[in-house]
Image (cartoon, rainbow, N blue to C red):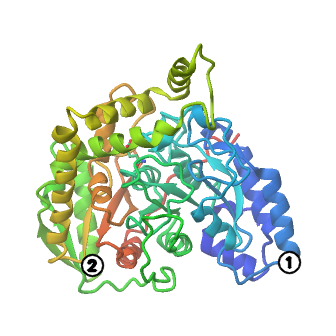
Amino acid sequence: MSDITKQSLSSLIKNIKEKKLSSVEITKAFIDRSEKSNELNAYITEDYSSALDKAKKFDQKPNLDLKLPGIPIAVKDLFCTKNIRTTAGSKILDNFIPTYESTITQNIWNEGAILLGKLNCDEFAMGSSNETSFYGNVQNPIDKNLVPGGSSGGSASALAGQLTPITIGTDTGGSIRQPASFTGTVGLKPTYGSCSRYGIVAFASSLDQAGPMAQNVKDCALLQEIISTYDPKDSTSINFKRNEYSKDLTNNIKGKRIGIPKEYRVEDMPKEIEELWQKGIQFVKDCGAEIVDISLPHTSYALPTYYIVAPAEASSNLARYDGVKYGFRAMGENLIDMYEKTRSEGFGAEVQRRIMIGTYVLSSGYYDAYYLKAQKVRKLIKNDFDEAYKKVDAILTPSTPSSAFKIGEKKDDPVSMYLNDIFTVPVNLAGLPGISIPAGHDDKGYPLGLQIIGKAFDEQNILNIAYAMEEKIDFKNKISDWWIK
Ligand code: GLN
């Protein structure tokens, strides 16, 4: 079978279960393609030879009852992997080899999956284009001049480029949904507290959430089923009854009420995004759901609120990188000098910017004016959603205000970069689940995504809506394998 890497996760699993393919054959195929894909720069650390060893071991004694039997997977380099370097895209963690495994990756290995390697990402997940990574930018398989989105840019590029059949990312303000939208893939940001944060390098702890990325909704549902577990090791993990998301998946969404928030019709929104949204509305109607106009009045405050809360938490989380306990250390004349040099040399410009903003908004003179105010506005944003959900079952919006932009285009303009998150950050601030599905192309042939936002813990519902829409949309990614020589 020469087309192994083109297959969806579900079909790979079926082929393994029916003994038409072995884990070694599948693993070799993905390694081979990954090796030919260096130009994308999707990987930071490769672990191919131990992946092959694990595949051989699996084939000797295959356990076909597992959910990911012998399936090779590459993951974002923000998840700690025991004995395998974990950098978070930063120089400061360039030599960091964790002695423990994140709960989410452990869940995946427990189901029989095999680690292929660690995928590139923005430094400490701060970015929307993967250009803040110490390990260089990542190319979008759609077009070599395009960013793949960020911060899970390596994950999105590897997935769309078929270097991994599925992957996991993290989403603090949009880092799963935005790159999914830029690469024509599916990405789910789960409800805050549903997937454990244990062993994930922290960015902004009250917003960070890991989630699945896949080529289609069904694969995404299966991965969510595996990674969403209660974890006593994460104090914010919530013990609720979880669905078997892939088994319970249905395309019957008749009678569902879908809200269209007028505040998401932002100024200067490109015509093609508006058209995509209208198309989405029609698809939802065709599936028998009902459209309801709603208002989320505090939407315009979400972005400024996020860019206070997230840097504040980041400045506190990143205080631990001081050159003493682990990670990079620059030599200094005394302790303070060593701290300063370590942090100036170890962190990139965007991370330093966030630390400065965060420290500023938390400082005693400005705490009330910025941080406290932002927390209050955050509550108002959450209240808007609560109010809306009295009338609707889910909300439909575009995922991003544009298609993928060019590498370098926004790099020197942080505010225009931050504007990318305009449709995704409200969801993180409110702790809700949101999924991005590919829904069309712009006139250049670049993919565009639609976002479905759910009530807290209602992942099944948004997966079902996405599943029903996916069938109607019948999206085909336009990838020519240009990077494979
Ligand atoms: N682009 C946003 C930021 O830079 C979101 C990042 C994320 O979700 N990790 O903060």
Kind of residue at badge 2? Asp
Left or right: residue 135 compared with residue 69: left
Relative side of 382 to 82, left or right: left
Residue 88 picture location, percent across and down: 56, 43
| Some atom of ligand 1 lies within 8 Å of the CB belonging to the residue at label 1 | no
> Taking the image as four quarters, which one is ligand 1 found in?
top left
Determine the secondary structure under disc 1. Answer: loop
Q: Is residue 297 visible?
A: yes
- Is residue 403 found left or right of 477 in the rendered image? left
Q: Position of residue 230 (x, y in %)?
A: 50, 74
Residue 293's place in the image compared with 421, above or below, is: below
Q: Quadrant of residue 176?
A: bottom left
Whole-percent x, y for residue 466 in the image: 38, 72
Residue denoted by label 1: 61
Write down the residue under mark 2.
286
Residue 292 screen position, x and y as percent: 14, 73
